[in-house]
Image (spheres, coloured by chain):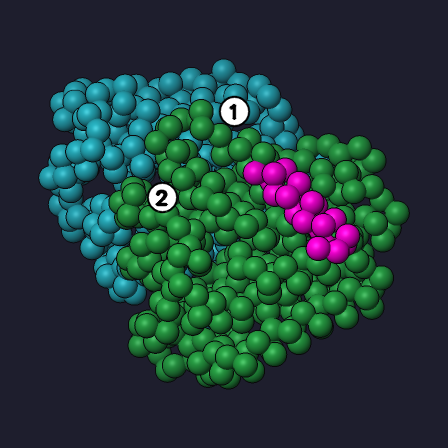
Chain colours: A green, B cyan
Amino acid sequence: MSGARVHFETWLDAQRRAVDEALEAVVPAHREPAFVWEAMRYSLFAGGKRLRPLLALAAAEAVAERRGGAAAQAHALAMPCACALELIHTYSLVHDDLPAMDNDVLRRGRPTAHVVYGEGLAILVGDALLTEAFAHLAAEPRTVDGVDDAELARRRIAAIRLIADAAGPSGMVGGQAIDLRAAGGNAAPLNADGLRDMHARKTGALIRAAALSGASMAGADGALGSAIDEYAFHVGLAFQIVDDILDVEGASADLGKTAGKDVAAGKPTYPALYGLDASRRLAAECIDRSLAALEGAGLAGHLPALAGWVVGRHS
Amino acid sequence: MSGARVHFETWLDAQRRAVDEALEAVVPAHREPAFVWEAMRYSLFAGGKRLRPLLALAAAEAVAERRGGAAAQAHALAMPCACALELIHTYSLVHDDLPAMDNDVLRRGRPTAHVVYGEGLAILVGDALLTEAFAHLAAEPRTVDGVDDAELARRRIAAIRLIADAAGPSGMVGGQAIDLRAAGGNAAPLNADGLRDMHARKTGALIRAAALSGASMAGADGALGSAIDEYAFHVGLAFQIVDDILDVEGASADLGKTAGKDVAAGKPTYPALYGLDASRRLAAECIDRSLAALEGAGLAGHLPALAGWVVGRHS
């Protein structure tokens, strides 16, 4: 491995550990009612790659670096968003896996929440993770050295709004609803534009909110925010294309979830629309564009390597 | 009717109209994807009594009156909380009615969301209403005449935290999980303490958060906040006891939902534990205590009449 690659992998491991430690404190084992918090922990600590938290932290770091700020301060500012984003991502998986939705029994190599706890509690676990995300954003960070309290409050409210808008009915939930309706045959099959719109909402919106909330917490102005948003838009699209490719190619064991489900369910995918080779080229183009957006704004840090990591490894 | 009663009914009608108008703007018909927003509106505009919004507005008014502030300013401050609370309450009804939970087909006299839209979309509608509640709290109120921007931001973050904590795993969601587990026979039947704890979480927490968030937005200090919290605690308990009584006594047509469900499902209720007469006395005692809490802090406004309304009319 090259030095740069080793450096990125070291950063990745350290950040993942930091995120998991922070999540341990946000969803601890000792709160009441214990069986609810334990069920939340089952899905939250199932070995996810923490892509959204990593995007939030890397974006905050890159903005801090660009503005002459410290990485440690950027982390303190962005970590609550990182945790909230992972709680929201996990809730969306728990609900998407339900029998009334994708009816998946395997996720990250383990039985899904409703298989373990029953449908009713799985629905509530999702609700709990989503609500706790906002409780955490409203609780942290209380103070950060070097940032005025009023300015911190302003940034925090902006981050809550970014994340809630991305997760809500016109974002992630809306995308899942469009997907559900298309798969159920209650609407016309999605064409290329429809597929793009569905994914932009279902996975793209939260990925953009991850990078953008991290950047905003670190004090990104309009121009830096736009560049981060463009970067994340293309990373999110690449992520979805790769996810579709893996669904076609992957075996259950490698993927940690049931493979071939999308095709079996008659869901529209990039490979189905464009073929495998063109889908791979499309993903590579998206990464190129994400890098161009960073360069144009003088942003770097771990964001370029993270973009490459997204298409190289499934999260 | 007495003059005071007429005055209260006039206030009640005006506030309900104001809340419904505000909710129209929060969940409008014209946003995309349209079928998701329409399904959210189906449950939101189903004729609810708006108890939680009314508590938030009345608490804000009472605090303003006590501190020499204007009712109009109190309204502007508390209305976003009022709307968010109703979105959260509605989401909880949509999810509680699901086949995997209470399996209710009738709510407020109309078919429940999953009957109309299917289980999958009903789950997503609940998710959407919950998320939009926090998006709204993060968006409004932007500015309020006479309140410093930094102070407003501080109050808003505190209100988001109050509401999220009350709705989350140790509050409303936790209470529903305890109820679900007890009804499913997967745990020992609830005794009197267990019943109280379950209701304190399932309905009590959000009712307290309603009054307390409204009071906080209006600038209540520690002592006024404590009095409002004690008032709301007793109102919430009375509300639940009356709800249990109505479930035993009521006919489906009057109640607008399937009556006798709790007893049929083997759920613990106040009448089952204490009998009907003792349950009625208990509800009356709760109201007395709620009024005493107000008097002790010199608070009044429409809060005393609202407490009486809770036990007199089902919401």
Which residue is the site of mark 1?
Answer: B299
Viewer-closest of B150 and B4: B150
Looking at the rendering, in which quadrant would you find the C terminus of chain B? top left
Which residue is the site of mark 2?
Answer: A124
Discs 2/1, front: 2
Q: Position of residue A22 (x, y in %)?
A: 59, 35
Kindly tell me whether residue A299 is visible in this rendering: yes
Q: Kindly report the distance in space between the C-alpha atoms of the residues bearing marks 2 and 1.
A: 37 Å
Which residue is drawn at the image coordinates 43% and 72% (left, top)? A248
Position of B23 with respect to A217 (left or right) is left
Position of B143 with respect to B204 (left or right) is right
Q: Position of residue B87 (x, y in %)?
A: 44, 50
Viewer-closest of B135 and A215: A215
Within the magenta stretch, is there residue A16? yes
- Residue extending farthest left: B264
Q: Amino acid at mark 2?
A: Leu
**Label 1 neighbourhood size at 10 Å, few (<14), some (14-19), many (20+)?**
many
Range of the magenta residues? A1-20
Within the magenta stretch, is there residue B176? no
Looking at the rendering, in which quadrant would you find the N terminus of chain B? top left
Q: Position of residue B179 (x, y in %)?
A: 26, 34
Which residue is drawn at the image coordinates 78% and 42% (left, top)? A71
**Label 2 neighbourhood size at 10 Å, few (<14), some (14-19), many (20+)?**
many
Position of A32 with respect to B185 (left or right) is right
In the image, are marks 2 and 1 on the same chain? no
Question: Considering the numbered disc 1 on the image, is that residue within a helix, a strand or a loop?
Answer: loop
Kindly tell me whether residue B123 is visible in this rendering: no
Q: Amino acid at mark 1?
A: Leu
Which residue is drawn at the image coordinates 64% and 50% (left, top)? A54
